[in-house]
Amino acid sequence: MSNEKNDHRLQAITSLMNQIDHHSSADPIQPSQLEDYKAALLQLSAHVDLFSEEDFPVPTPKEIAKTYLLAENADAGAALYLVSILPFGPSPIHDHGTFAIIAGLSGFEQNTVYARASDESGAGKATLTVDRTFDLGRFDALALMPNDIHHIDNQYSLPTRHLHLYGTAFEHQLDRLEFDITQQTAKIAPAMTVPVDRSRQVV
């Protein structure tokens, strides 16, 4: 990685994280804030040259997925990752307990977003219906509020490489729910144990 590219990546990521940190005092996050963050992450993802496959290799077949931490704000604040996933089956249906935004760099992942019955919340009974399904690729982004529910799937021939921005880092997402659409139930999700490569962290 060239020093010039490293400097540009540092500046671009720092600008994004400063924006998130500046607004993080508002709790809970407002939809208008989420849209601002989505626009900022899309702007960052447009700099594809800063996140080349040479600098951020896709996972090996044994790994299936590769997660690079790019930045994390202080005090368990927002975290930015580059996530690459090989063609594989669907993830569990889940929320994040915090805001989540995905912006595409390369490859396509299918996102299915669900609606939950309005009189239900938390763990327990969970009646889900499919709200929308779409392929997220380059120039696309998906923004989710803390209680929004989705799952991802990559059954295409190429790995995905996308930017993921969360209100808290994976290891601090302790309020996540997983859903069983057949049993119509929700439960507290197991603690995240995703292997994270921190060698590219710049902030």
Image (cartoon, rainbow, N blue to C red):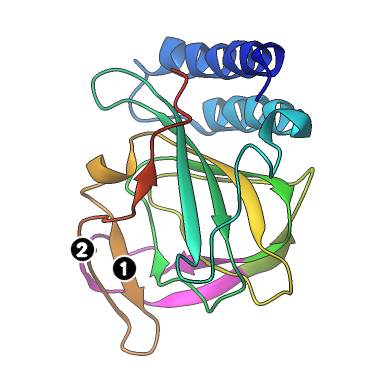
The local crowd at label 1, few if under 14, some if 14 to 19, many if 20 or more residues have their Cα within 10 Å, is many
State the residue in front, 68 or 154. 68
Residue 12, given in percent of the width and then of the height, sits at 63, 16
Mark seen at residue 178: 1
Image: magenta residue range: 111-131
Mark seen at residue 80: none
- Say what amino acid the circle numbered 2 marks: Pro
In the picture provided, is 150 more to the left or to the right than 173? right
Dividing the picture into quarters, in which one does residue 181 lie? Answer: bottom left
In the rendered structure, are the residues bearing label 2 and label 1 in contact, judged by CB atoms less than 8 Å apart?
A: yes
Q: Residue at x 49, y 61 (%)?
A: 65
In the picture provided, is 100 more to the left or to the right than 127? right
In the displayed structure, 43 sits above or below 106; it is: above
Q: Residue at x 63, y 30 (%)?
A: 41
Residue 55, given in percent of the width and then of the height, sits at 63, 37
Residue 120 visible here? no
Residue 85, given in percent of the width and then of the height, sits at 56, 61
State the residue position of label 2. 190
